[in-house]
Image (cartoon, grey):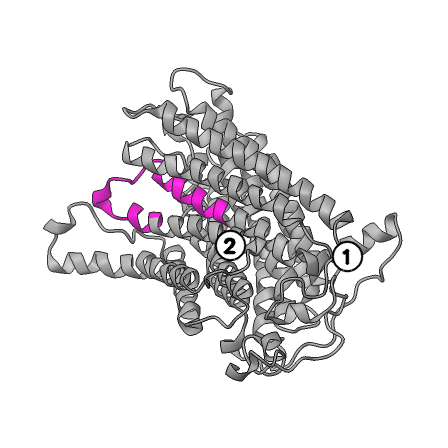
Amino acid sequence: MTTIDTHATGAADAGAGLACVADWLTTTDHKRIGRLYVGTSLVALVGSLVVAALLAAERISTSSTIVDLGSLTQLFSVYRFGLTYVVMLPLLLGVAVAVVPLQVGSRAIAFPRTAMSGFWAWLLGAVLAIISIAANGGPNGGNKRFVDLFLLSAILCIGGLLATTVSLATSILTTRTPGMNMRRVPLFTWSVLVMALGLVIALPVVAGDLLILFIGHKYPSLSELSGNRVLGTTFAFGFSQTTTLLFAVPVLGFLAEVVATANRSRTRQRGIVLAGIGLTVSAVFGVALQWPTGIRSGFSSLSGGDKVSDLLPFALVHLLPLLGAFLAVVLTLGSIRKGVKLHPALVFGVLAALLTFDGFLGNALANIGDAGLAGTSFEEGVWLALVYGAVIAGMGALVHWGPKLWGRLIPMKAVLPLALLTFVGGTLASLPMMVAGFADQPGAVFPVVQDGDSVVAFSYSGPASLWNGLAAAGHALVLLSVLAFVALALRSFLAGEKAGDDPWDGLTLEWATTSPAPADNFADLHVVQSAEPLLDLKPSNGSDAR
């Protein structure tokens, strides 16, 4: 396996003004492409959090409203679409684009223009989709033309993400430095490959469903799926689990990566951790099958054959990803050495993994019919746990790899409280929704239709003000934490303390180049002999290379 040494090169670093802007707009440097994804998704995160807090506050009281009822349909669509396809996936994808070619010792990402084109397609599709929703398009929208625009824009958005994903997966499979076989791939890179392979299957399915819905909506005589109202029910799987489980897989790899860095040692039981992360890709079958893979109510009274027909797909789609997440999280956390030096990204990684595992566990529980959680807010809580786990991991990734991208450090004392606050906010936003689901609070993947009109009904026998009040506070706390983090990151990366080439005493190849990394990443081609090539250079640790 050889590294791609040549690649498309954008304009040379230019001065201020239009030349610099054009350089960024047409760049083929994967580090810049990744930063464009991350920066744009963080801006979208702020807007989505405002909507999330507003909707949670709206549900505190079932007898009064904060916003016009006619706007709730659009707000819920922005909430779901924004946090899923404009924040969660592009945030982690952007981190991967910026970091993975460095980790595998490549001088460029494969198909750099494809990756950059994917960014612009995603951004244009996302902007048009939000505009169409605001104009009464989108799921349950009342404006036919803007419903069509939403469907086409969402296809464009997902197509852009798919293009970048293909570029990223190709880089991992074909541009690794000599000596780096798949057993020696860095842990974060492995998790990105697992996600990418799943997305290559899942995203075309999601886009294909959107295309079918567009044809049925545009030409009602050709399809039974012809009304505006079917979008929220037919396409709900694209905004929910198990689709979002695939998006969250890199969180597990990030945890394993930062724990190994903090330990400054080789990962114990590395093979099992890799296998655990790999098991999570089985969630893709839930997207591909698109039929119920849960355990029906009254399972104990079913015949033996019916039990098997329920258990097999349930185990494949829900239990295997849960088992994989469990192995990855438990083995990684169990490997943390006593007295390990506190690494700032380590805190982010642990907290992100805890929320993400909560999402994997909740997904399995939600698909057990006797739990009685179908149609409740429990699913929303699971989804939020995955989303906020990804957000915390994205923030931690900027702390960890920011020095390699910008050449400067984020102060540990200032950033650690923000990690804790974001985790508390994410827990408050997600856990009360799960508890409310057990109390039968109706879910709101999209507004339901009653008597021909779109309505959102949250009235139920439980303490609505308590659970939704806690959720609103959680969203607001995440919003404040993210704003503070963005301000701190901007200040630090523009004028903060300069970082050395290897500020964390790292183990993988990205720390073998200068900070910030040059356009071509490495001056010399590295040949690796283990999964921790930098550790091999240290005489006291090189004897156990593998």
Whole-percent x, y for residue 219 in the image: 49, 42
Residue 57 seen in render: yes
Q: Which amino acid does label 2 sit on?
A: Gly
Of 34 and 445, nearer the camera is 34
Tell me residue 211's x, y (percent): 50, 50
- Asked if residue 371 is among those painted magenta in the image, a careful observer would answer yes
Instruction: Note whether 67 is above or below 123 in the view shown.
Output: above
Please state which of residues 223 and 63 is positioned toward the viewer in this rendering: 63
In the figure, is residue 163 to the left or right of 199?
right
Residue 148 percent location from the top left of the image: 55, 40
Report the magenta residues as a range: 362-389
**Residue 479 position (above or below residue 335):** above
Residue 110 on image: x %, y %: 65, 69
**Residue 143, label in figure:** none
Q: Mark 2 points at which residue?
A: 349
Tell me whether circle 1 and circle 2 mark residues in contact (CB < 8 Å).
no
The 10 Å Cα crowd at callout 1, few under 14, some 14 to 19, many 20 or more, is some
> Between residues 52 and 197, which one lies in front from this camera angle?
52
Q: Give the prevailing secondary structure in the magenta stretch.
A: helix
Task: Tell me which label, 1 or 2, sits earlier in the chain.
Answer: 1
Q: Which residue lies furthest to the top in this view?
A: 64
Of discs 1 and 2, which sits in the foreground?
A: 2
Spatial separation of the CA atoms under disc 1 and disc 2: 33 Å
Give the residue displayed 82% in from the left and 50% down from the top: 21
Determine which of the numbered discs, if any, sits on residue 26 in the image: 1
- Left or right for 98, reference 280: right
The N terminus appears in which quarter of the rendering?
bottom right
Q: Which amino acid does label 1 sit on?
A: Thr
Image-quadrant location for residue 469: top left
Query: What SS does tag 1 mark?
Result: loop
Mark 2, other Cα within 10 Å: few <14 / some 14–19 / many ≥20: many
